[in-house]
Image (cartoon, grey):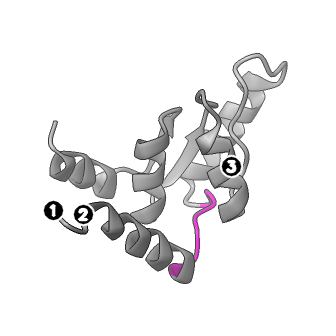
Amino acid sequence: PRPTDLARVLTEAAGMIRGRFHHSLAATALGVHFVAFPSPPPPLQATNEILGLEPPIAYEDPALEEKLAAATMAIVSGQGRVIDETVRRRILDLAELNFVGL
């Protein structure tokens, strides 16, 4: 799929459950609630920490089912955690740097 397809799907979604770094970052920039699973290497863990979001839920976590259910309910009820507009703008500004010189 094209990046515009991903953006359209994300903006129409109530939330997302992912372990992929770039998809989670896109959801964050678009203000979409998401639940994260760890991905190697650990960029998603570090990014969530920097942005003040919940850490990814480890697959081997004994409370995985309960945490996933709680996070999903938070998304469905509109209570999932998202970043504020200042941080979102900073992410978008940094993302634009990927295209400098093209």
Along the line of sight, the residue nearer the viewer: 10 or 37: 37
Q: Amino acid at mark 2?
A: Phe
Q: Which mark is residue 64?
A: none
Q: Which residue is mark 2?
A: 99
Q: Amino acid at mark 3?
A: Ala
Considering only order in the chain, which callout, 3 or 2, is on the residue closer to the N terminus? 3
Q: Which residue is mark 1?
A: 102
Provide residue 32's location: percent of width, then percent of height: 45, 58
Along the line of sight, the residue nearer the viewer: 97 or 66: 97
The magenta region covers 79-85
Residue under the point 61% across and 31% down: 41
Residue under the point 37% across and 64% down: 95
Q: Which mark is residue 46?
A: 3
Residue under the point 53% across and 32% down: 19
Q: Is residue 49 left or right of residue 91?
A: right
Q: Amino acid at mark 1?
A: Leu
Along the line of sight, the residue nearer the viewer: 7 or 71: 7
Residue 81: say if magenta: yes
